[in-house]
Amino acid sequence: MTPDPVPPCPVPDAHRRLMDCHAQWHLLHESYYDPDVFRLNLNSLVPNLRNVTWLLQKRKAVIPDFETWYPQFQQSAASSEIMKWVVKSRNRITKESDLELLSSSRVVWIRDWLQRAEGTASFEPRKTTPEILLTLYRNGVPPVGTATLKRRWVDKALPDWELLAATSEAYARLSQLVWTAHRAFGIERCDLPDRSTECVTSALADSLVRLPCMHLAQSELQTHISMSGGVYEEEAKRFDFDPEKMEEAAVRYGELAYPVSGPVENVPGFMAMARTMMERDGSHGTFAFLYSGQQQVAVRALQFGDQQSKILIFEGIADLVESTRADGVVIIGESWTALQTEKEKELKTVFFPARDRLDRMECLTVYALTRDGRHAELVSMVERGENGETRCAEPMDVSFEAGMNTMVPIKLRWADMQKRGI
């Protein structure tokens, strides 16, 4: 059967310019450590972002219902700090002067889940890790925990936004706008050819999700340092569902009912799946599922080397929450639990984490949290038989405690996103 022909692009000028912006964004990223080239690329990208809307408006006479949906975009853009910045910056670049760029590093020091501090500092690009550590020690940062260095270019007129993040946010909004124009013609995909750069394609997004390549590129600009020396590597691997692997899983585990509701509502279904897999394999990995409403927008398989790397991985999940606009998170995995001692109950504290206690118990946990504060958690105790068999007890609906610490970076990110209007 011959596949249906792909329709021609209904707004080719605006769509091509959007693809130009994608390519220029990567040039901006590649020149991050060269101030003059960075400024040159930024001066080219910002006007082109603005030009996408103008090129779309030039075809308004032939675009169905343009006068209905385009004013909705204008209203949204008028309330967006980023889109207002794009308009003002284009005028400054073309009529007045360069943007007032400021370069710094944001330093995030993390001792544990609840103790952290942020500040800004300036480091030479060629400065070694020991030299950076020495500077941090001299500035009073304790030699415990981790420090994350995030390289930052900001415009004085937009101090709360790093410029790669700001321009990728603007790109996401414009991609959704061009997608809306395609939908007005009754199509979602057109024949506009892709570019030679693999990620620069004519694909469009129907939501404000940043492109995976942009998310990855921004993560490359930060370094995680152990305050006792050494560099941490994140281990949060993208997990895509493979139809063949799903068939293999059906043979191994039987027909698993995959949950398809919102994150909080999915907790019982995920627990049922986790218990089946745990009893079959004797172990269970840790996974993060991110949602926008009821739509699953990302899945990550998580591997922890130690407690500090676990904290950093969940900091990375918080970055992904912003890139995907996720408003709900589900975490599944094995964990340790222990009962509080009478002294701990009296003092309302915990002296020793469950992982370090001799009386620790193994369990499966599934917990969920949404941006509006809804949450759920189920725990299933794991029992090991003499012959190596594994049994998972009936799940218990418990207070939201096991997942509270790991959700701290995500809750902080949602608060920061609220502050920046996203």
Image (cartoon, rainbow, N blue to C red):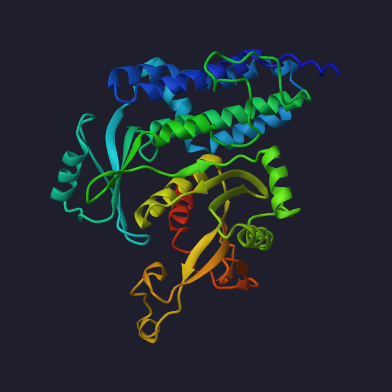
> How far across and how far down the image is residue 95, in percent?
39, 16
Q: Is residue 417 above or below residue 377?
A: above
Q: Is residue 30 above or below residue 222?
A: above
Give left or right: position of 155 versus 419: left
Which residue is at the far left? Answer: 138
Nearest to the observer: residue 54 or residue 108: 108
Q: Residue at x 44, y 62 (%)?
A: 405
Which residue is at the far right? Answer: 1
Nearest to the observer: residue 184 or residue 396: 396
Nearest to the observer: residue 351 or residue 110: 351
Residue 34 figure quarter: top left
Q: Residue at x 47, y 56 (%)?
A: 411
> How far across and how far down the image is residue 288, in percent?
55, 51
Which residue is at the far front? Answer: 387
Give left or right: position of 181 versus 48: right
> How far across and how far down the image is residue 243, in percent?
70, 38
State which quarter of the image contains the N terminus: top right
